[in-house]
Image (cartoon, helix red, strand yellow):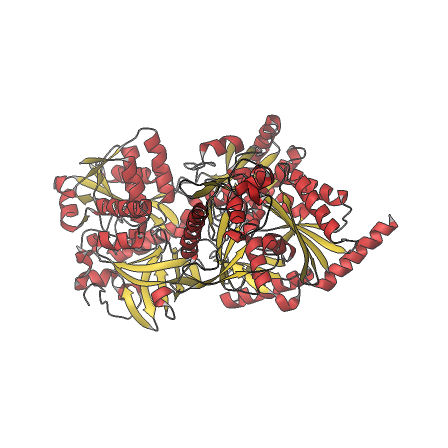
């Protein structure tokens, strides 16, 4: 079984080839402004290093492209938002508590209509279908193509969102409707925020994933494309394009999962030192520890399940000031290979300091002759302090932790750090994020109302069903693990009714991949 | 009387959430609503109970219901104002000021939202000093003041008045039924009080207390100091446990959110485990079958990092939390007070022993 994992970071695009559970080769190329030519270059570099041949089973890409678009306020599309909750909730309309610059980019108009449900499953107000049809025409006349529908208590009963989505499809050609109940649970505003961010990113996601597909075929790969998700699983390309917010934090998840895989450790602090930032996370049972309830994305409040991360401006491309010994937060980013002193540029970076200190051998060392040993020590001391402070922030108890240092800038992590028992470095650690993408898992989900059984019986049945779905999706039945379980009582329905959501993940079963690959090869030769 | 600043409103939301002891609903939506008014130039006055005349009619307000429902139905200031004006129509008098029944959670700010529309000041007092789930769990009930009338308002044009009940418990039963029918969330105006009653039985200066707590947290976070320590210092509290949430079980029954959470110890508490039971608010903390703290002591579960309070409806697996206790208002420590809000009032057959009197 061969899989290619690619991680598109702000500075580097990393790619690895994994065959039968072993990393065969890792490559690192500069991320390009258009993202996709960097992806193509990475696959080509991989192909040059090891002949990929025809046997690649899957291409898995992790990208921070979508979350960066929100943070940097670019490539966002205007969205029409329909909230189905009148006569309630109108005092806090959609886009309340959004940063105004972001709201301006995403807000294509807000409509509120009657409808929705109560906590117990009863109808809250009759659904105003006539108003929805009128609104659909207004949206069509405004030329808006992306619509969010969010109904009161839709995670319990999504029927109103689905009914209004159907009307949008009838009235607006080529419309794309994001139903909020698919993006979040109870919490009307947070669910709506997630849905709006999602809808405003779909155009970019479609374009990006299309370009990934193109890059893939340009280098002659026929393997299916998957995009990695926040929870360490993968989604097929088409689904990923529809739900870009689910891949928001996949870069961090990938690097932590990759660190766990390469080191064989399940409990450790991970630091991924890239070109621009160092990200600190905490592995628990091989998965990143999740952040507490509310996560702000680009200033917008959401309830996404994301890894608990601390990110600081420290990386291989960080600017260095010799006088003060300060590093970052500014970075030369993907221009490292042009701008760093050792590469003939004019900017002193953390990479130059690493070369001067003999931590890494890159470029032309003679260009650093003017830097004194004291100055180098001074900068490295500052770097050590920054690392120690943030490892400590990730800790939950006072004892020493094991630190796995990965990423292209991991040479900046010294062997001795206060509060760290040992620093673990792994082969291919520079591409841990791409490894994490390559080993991403498949999932099986259940979201269903159960009646006439106890809570534990309901969760157990949901779990069984989700496990079966994961296996059906290609998971190895030996590797299944529960990663999400949530139950919400529906008091109004008889028989102790409750809605149960369960998510199971498992490693991709190799036979399945082989089989689907054979089918693909057959298709190719037939065409 | 003093005017509340925009910073006071921000601090109040943080402090009220801590005093909410897990319930009362998150003040976030009320804060958003108040920010909108403050941005439009509206200002609210806070009046000390000592400044009230004995005969002044005072409205007592709250939004009743299940915190989980608040997450969907949000906050509408017009409803709480309507609850007060419906009461004015019923009793035929205009109120001089409005006060919260509970300072804890979103209800600590509902009186401000009512005040915006009614143009009257907010009294710096409440009847719980925290949040409690039921109508008879107030200092007014301990003082045996009249439990009626009550107005109950729903956004769909349903308005109900409970004209008379035989006791506070009957008021709880009847008003809860209305609340559940209306979707487990209603805006209510409780039995009107006089200035004299507020001075005799209200818990004074709790809005100021919440603002001070909020300011202490904000300052600690600004200076990168320990926010938990700042809270304990500001209110003479006690730290009880530090750990990670490993289990949450909740169910919505009879208009309440009930359940329990299990926290596994970290740091100095490594190896130990506690269970925290809740009925909207945190009620009892158990350690190996023994209660280590219970109501009326205030039990607060806080984010260990930021000091931010965590609600019973939002607490979830994996969170790192610190459990602390804050002292209760003296009115609840009498035998009569404990009848209303002690552990037995919540169905726990255990004696109350304050962690502040050991």
Q: Classify residue B252 as left or right of residue B174.
A: right
Q: Classify residue A148 as left or right of residue A4.
A: left
Q: How many marks?
A: 0
Report the residue at 21% width, 56% height from top: B236
Residue A149 visible, this angle? no
Report the residue at 55% width, 67% height from top: A460
**Toward the viewer: B82 or B46?**
B46
Extreme residue toward the bottom, this view? B289
Q: Classify residue A172 as left or right of residue A389.
A: right
Report the residue at 13% width, 39% height from top: B51
**Toward the viewer: A47 or A60?**
A47
Residue A438 in picture, x, y percent from top left: 65, 55
Residue A108 in picture, x, y percent from top left: 54, 30
**Toward the viewer: B227 or A278?**
A278
Residue A136 in picture, x, y percent from top left: 59, 32
Residue B59 in picture, x, y percent from top left: 23, 42
Please tell me in which quadrant of the rendered image residue A421 appears: bottom left
Extreme residue toward the right, this view? A526
Please tell me in which quadrant of the rendered image residue B96 appears: top left
Location of the N terminus of chain A (image quadrant): bottom right
Up/down of A339 relative to A486, above or below: above
Residue B42 visible, this angle? yes
């Amino acid at each position: 079984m061969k899989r290619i994992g690619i991680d598109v970071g702000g500075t580097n695009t990393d790619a690895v080839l994994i065959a039968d559970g072993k990393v065969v080769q890792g490559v690192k190329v500069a991320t390009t402004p258009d993202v996709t030519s960097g992806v193509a270059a990475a696959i080509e570099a991989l192909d040059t290093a090891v002949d990929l041949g025809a046997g690649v089973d899957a291409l898995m890409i992790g990208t921070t492209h979508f979350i960066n678009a929100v943070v940097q306020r670019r490539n966002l599309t205007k969205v029409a938002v329909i909230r189905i909750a009148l006569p309630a909730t109108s005092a806090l309309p959609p886009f309340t508590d959004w940063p105004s610059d972001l709201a301006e980019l995403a807000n294509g108009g807000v409509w509120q209509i009657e409808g929705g449900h109560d906590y117990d499953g009863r109808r809250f107000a009759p659904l105003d279908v006539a108003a929805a049809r009128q609104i659909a025409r207004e949206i069509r006349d405004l030329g808006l193509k992306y619509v969010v529908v969010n109904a009161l208590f839709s995670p319990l009963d999504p029927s109103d969102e689905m009914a209004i989505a159907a009307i949008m499809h009838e009235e607006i050609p080529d419309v794309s409707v994001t139903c909020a109940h698919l993006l979040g649970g109870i919490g009307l505003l947070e669910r709506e925020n997630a849905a709006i961010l999602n809808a405003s990113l779909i155009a970019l996601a479609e374009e990006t994933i299309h370009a990934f597909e193109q890059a893939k075929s340009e280098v002659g790969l026929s393997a299916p494309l998957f995009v990695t998700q926040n929870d360490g699983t993968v989604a097929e390309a088409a689904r990923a394009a529809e739900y870009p917010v689910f891949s928001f934090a996949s870069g961090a998840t990938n690097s932590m999962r990759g660190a766990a895989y390469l080191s064989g450790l399940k409990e450790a602090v991970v630091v991924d030192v890239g070109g621009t930032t160092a990200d600190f996370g905490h592995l628990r049972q091989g998965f990143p520890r999740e952040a507490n309830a509310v996560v702000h994305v680009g200033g917008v409040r959401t309830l996404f399940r994301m890894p608990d991360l601390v990110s600081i401006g420290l990386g291989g491309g960080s600017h260095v000031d010799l006088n003060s010994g300060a590093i970052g937060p500014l970075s030369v980013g993907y221009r490292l290979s042009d701008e760093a002193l050792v590469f003939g540029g004019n900017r002193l970076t953390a990479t130059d300091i690493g070369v001067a200190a003999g931590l890494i051998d890159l470029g032309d060392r003679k260009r650093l002759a003017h830097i004194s040993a004291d100055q180098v020590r001074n900068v490295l001391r500052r770097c050590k302090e920054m690392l120690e402070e943030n490892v400590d922030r990730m800790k939950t108890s006072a004892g020493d932790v094991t630190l796995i240092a990965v990423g292209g800038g991991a040479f900046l992590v010294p062997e001795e750090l206060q509060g760290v028992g040992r620093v673990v470095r792994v082969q291919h650690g520079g591409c841990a994020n791409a490894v994490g993408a390559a080993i991403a898992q498949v999932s099986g989900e259940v979201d269903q109302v159960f009646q006439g059984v106890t809570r534990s019986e309901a969760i157990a049945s949901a779990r069984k069903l989700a496990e079966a779905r994961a296996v059906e999706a290609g998971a190895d039945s030996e590797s299944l693990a529960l990663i999400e379980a949530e139950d919400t009582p529906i008091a109004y329905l008889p028989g102790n009714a409750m809605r149960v959501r369960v998510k199971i993940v498992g490693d991709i079963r190799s036979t399945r991949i082989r089989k689907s690959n054979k089918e693909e090869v057959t298709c190719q030769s037939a065409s | 009387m003093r005017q509340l600043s925009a910073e006071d409103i921000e601090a109040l939301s943080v402090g009220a959430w801590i005093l909410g002891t897990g319930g009362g609903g998150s003040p976030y939506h009320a804060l958003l609503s108040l920010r909108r008014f403050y941005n439009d130039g509206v200002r609210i006055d806070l009046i000390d109970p000592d400044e009230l005349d004995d005969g002044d009619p005072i409205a007592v307000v709250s939004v009743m219901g299940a915190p989980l429902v608040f997450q969907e139905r949000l906050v509408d200031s017009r409803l709480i104002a309507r609850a007060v004006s419906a009461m004015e129509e019923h009793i035929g008098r205009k109120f001089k000021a409005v006060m919260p029944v509970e300072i804890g959670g979103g209800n600590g700010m509902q009186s401000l939202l009512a005040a915006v529309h009614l143009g009257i000041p907010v009294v710096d007092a409440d009847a719980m000093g925290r949040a409690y789930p039921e109508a008879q769990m107030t200092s007014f009930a301990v003082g045996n003041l009249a439990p009626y009338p009550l107005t109950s308002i729903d956004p769909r044009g349903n308005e109900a008045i409970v004209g008379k009940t035989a006791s506070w418990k009957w008021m709880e039963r009847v008003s809860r039924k209305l609340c559940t029918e209306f979707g487990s969330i209603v805006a209510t105006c409780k039995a009107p009080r006089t200035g004299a009653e507020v001075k005799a039985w209200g818990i004074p200066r709790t809005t100021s207390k919440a603002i001070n707590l909020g300011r202490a947290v904000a300052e600690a976070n600004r200076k990168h100091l320990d926010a938990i320590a700042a809270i304990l210092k500001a209110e003479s509290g006690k730290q009880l446990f530090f750990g990670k949430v490993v289990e949450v079980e909740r169910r919505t029954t009879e208009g309440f959110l009930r359940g329990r959470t299990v926290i596994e110890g970290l740091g100095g508490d490594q190896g130990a485990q506690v269970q925290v039971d809740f009925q909207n608010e945190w009620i009892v903390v158990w350690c190996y079958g023994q209660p280590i703290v219970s109501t009326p002591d205030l039990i607060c579960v806080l984010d260990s990092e930021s000091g931010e309070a965590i609600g019973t409806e939002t607490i979830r697996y994996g969170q790192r939390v610190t459990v602390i206790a804050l002292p209760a208002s003296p009115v609840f420590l009498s035998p009569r007070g404990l009848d209303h809000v002690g552990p037995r009032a919540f169905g726990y057959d255990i004696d109350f022993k304050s962690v502040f009197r050991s």
